[in-house]
Amino acid sequence: MAKKLFSKPTILITRPISDSGLNLIRHNYKLILNTTGRPLDRIALKRKVRNVDAILCFLNDKIDKEIMDLAGPNLKIISTFSTGYEHIDILEAKKRDIKVGYTGSILTETTADLGFGLLLSIGRRIIEGDKLVRNGKWKYGWSPDLMIGTDIHGKTIGIIGMGKIGSAIAKRALGFDMNILYTSRGSIPNLLDNKKIPLSETMKYVDLNRIAKESDYVVVCCSLNKDSYHLINRRFIFQMKKSAFLINIARGKIINQKDLISALTEKRIAGAALDVYEDEPIQNNDPLIKMKNVVLLPHIGSATVDTRNRMAEIAASNIINVLEGKYRKAVLVE
Ligand code: DGY
């Protein structure tokens, strides 16, 4: 019997991805696919990662030195189905010349859509209104004092982190005639060169204190790093207007959640709308769950059919391109 000379490279896929991505790798690679519908726990991840050539992972998978050791010398790429890659030890991967792929900016507009949805929901009490109707508590038809909210148009939005998602939020805010304050790491970003965003008198680069003091809606859009960890804390929140709202579509750890809970309990701000939390999922007994002045979503910023399909394609293509040595075609962490 002829000896099989070449075996197919193996890819560990830690959770199912849509066919748009799976079909790209189904035939030419050996797939180890977790189909349990749950993230792999650490023990299962350690067992399944042995000797693989590539890992297609998600935000819940901590890919550290131990996992890279267990994968062994065949591992050439860790491709995350996300734009954030804080769950991967990038330095360790670099040391071993393991490439790290991510989904780049494909989810920018989708995440900004959701961010604006949160802003509208908390300002205009949309979720509260829905609950009131469903719970049979809508008693008298139109009422002059029912579910009074806060305007969006004419108000000031403070955008923390004017990167791609921040800019996409700004575009939407301009459409709603909002005044825009923004802050960004380092120098003023190239925002005004972006032809999609009109140069506008209503858009001002300011420091964090001004964002806190002057905004009616603060939207957190920056990435999580050592400088942004707990950037929004008691000090920031206590400077906010009592009528203001805090919205987070970036990462939970940018906000000190304990400080936020105290501020909401003491009514120091009007409310918060969150898609992300310090620990996910939040527990059923988390104080946020019982609060009326919050809107809580389960980290779904990028969760649309089109965007998740594109993310699957990019995550799979990153693996193919790296395994085939076409590094330039892959979306890689530098
Ligand atoms: C990301 O990709 O980083 C998002 O938070 C999940 O879609």
Image: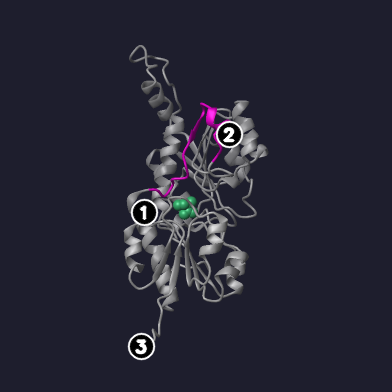
Count of picture labels:
3
What's the amino acid at mark 3? Ala
Packing grade of label 1 (10 A; few <14, some 14-19, many >=20) is: some
What residue is shown at x 65% (from left), y 40% (from top)? 233
- Sequence-wise, the earlier of marks 1 and 3 is 3
Q: Which residue is mark 2?
A: 286
What's the amino acid at mark 2? Asp
Horizontal relation, residue 83 to residue 212: left or right: left
Q: Which residue is mark 3?
A: 2
Of residue 67 and residue 173, the one placed in the foreground of this image is 67
Horizontal relation, residue 278 to residue 138: left or right: right
- Sequence-wise, the earlier of marks 2 and 3 is 3
Residue 122 vs 188, above or below: the answer is above
Q: Is residue 296 magenta?
A: yes
Callout 2: helix, strand or loop?
Answer: loop
Label for residue 318?
none
Is there CB contact under 8 Å for labels 2 and 1? no
Please name which of the two marks, 2 or 1, marks the residue nearer to the observer. 2
Where in the figure is residue 7, as x and y percent of width and height?
41, 79
Q: Residue furthest top?
A: 140
Which region shows up in magenta?
282-303
Q: Real-space Cα distance between discs 2 and 3?
A: 62 Å
Please name which of the two marks, 2 or 3, marks the residue nearer to the observer. 3
Label for residue 307?
1
Callout 3: helix, strand or loop?
Answer: loop
Packing grade of label 2 (10 A; few <14, some 14-19, many >=20) is: few
**For residue 314, what is the image quadrant?**
bottom left
What residue is shown at x 63% (from left), y 49% (from top)? 229
Residue 305 vs 139, above or below: the answer is below
Please name which of the two marks, 1 or 3, marks the residue nearer to the observer. 3
Callout 1: helix, strand or loop?
Answer: helix
